Amino acid sequence: MLELLLPRRCGGCGAPGEHLCGACRRALAQPPQRVSPRTHPHVPTFAFGTYAGAHRGVVLAMKERNNLALRRHLGAVVAAGLEHLEARGEIPAGAGLVPAPTRASSARARGGDPVEAVCRASGRQTWPALALAPRTADQSTLGAEERRANLAGAVRAAFVPAGPVIVVDDVVTTGATLEASVAKLLALGCDVAACVALCAA
Ligand SMILES: [Zn+2]
C-alpha cells in the first residue's frame, strides 16, 4: 500500500523515479572481485563493491519490508555476478546458495530475511539451512575478535545442503559470520565453493 502512495525512489541513491536508477544499475553491474576479510572464511570470497554509494544504498533499502522490486533486481545482479565468476572458472557451474544466518528476531522485524529473498530471486537453488542461536549478541558494535568469540558455536544447521554451494551475505565486515558459516558447513561435509557478499565494509 505504501508503495502505491509514496513516490518511487531509487534504492541506491534515493533519486525519485525508478526502483533503481541507471547510474546505480551500472555501479551494481560491476563483476564481483576477490576480497580478503580479516577473519578469512576458508574459501575464496568475493564482493560486488565496497560499502559506499549505490552498494550501501541498496543494502540498507533491501532490508525494508516493502522493497520487493529492489530484492528482485538484486537477485538478477547476484545471478549475473555468479555467471561471471563461473565464466572465469572461479566457482563451479550451477552451485546452490546458502544465505548467511541472521538472528531470527532481526529477520522477522524485516519481514523475512532479505538475503534469502535475494538468493531466491536469483533463480538459483537456495538452501536456507543456517540460523544463529537465539542468544547470539548483535554483531554491529563488536570488533573482529569479539565477533569471532560471539559466533563460535552459534551457527546452527537445520540440514546439510547438497553441494557445491556458495554462502551469500549482504555485507562482509570482519568475515566472522562467513567464517563461522563455512566452518559449520564444512564440518557437516558440505562442499562449500565460495562466499559472495553484495559489498565489503
Ligand atoms: Zn540511484
Image (tube, rainbow, N blue to C red):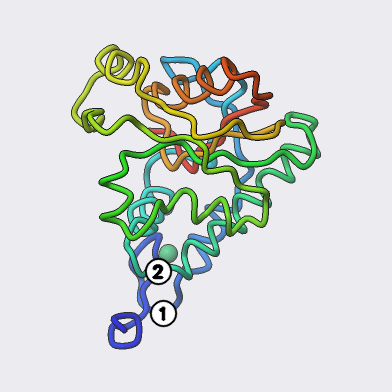
Disc 2, SS: loop
Q: 138 or 28, which is in the foreground?
A: 138
Which residue is pictured at 51% across the width and 41% down the height?
99
| Ligand 1 closer than 8 Å to label 1 CB | no
- Left or right placement of residue 149 versus residue 93 in this view: left
Which residue is pictured at 29% across the width and 81% down the height?
2
User: Which quarter of the frame holds ligand 1?
Assistant: bottom left
* Residue 194 figure quarter: top right
- Left or right placement of residue 156 versus residue 145 in this view: right
Q: Name the residue carrying label 2.
A: 10
| Ligand 1 closer than 8 Å to label 2 CB | yes
Q: Are marks 2 and 1 in contact (CB under 8 Å)?
A: yes
Which residue is pictured at 71% across the width and 31% down the height?
164
10 Å neighbourhood of mark 1: few (<14), some, or many (≥20)?
few
Query: Residue most toward the front?
Result: 158
Query: Residue most toward the bottom?
Result: 5
Which residue is pictured at 48% across the width and 60% down the height?
24
For the N terminus, which image quadrant? bottom left
In this picture, is 124 found above or below 10? Answer: above
Q: Name the residue carrying label 1.
A: 17
Q: What residue type is labelled 2?
A: Cys
The earlier-in-sequence mark between 2 and 1 is: 2
Disc 1, SS: loop
* Residue 156 figure quarter: top left
Q: 128 or 5, which is in the foreground?
A: 128
10 Å neighbourhood of mark 2: few (<14), some, or many (≥20)?
many
In this picture, is 118 found above or below 194? Answer: below
The picture places residue 40, in percent across and down from the top left corner, at 49, 15
Q: Which amino acid does label 1 sit on?
A: Gly
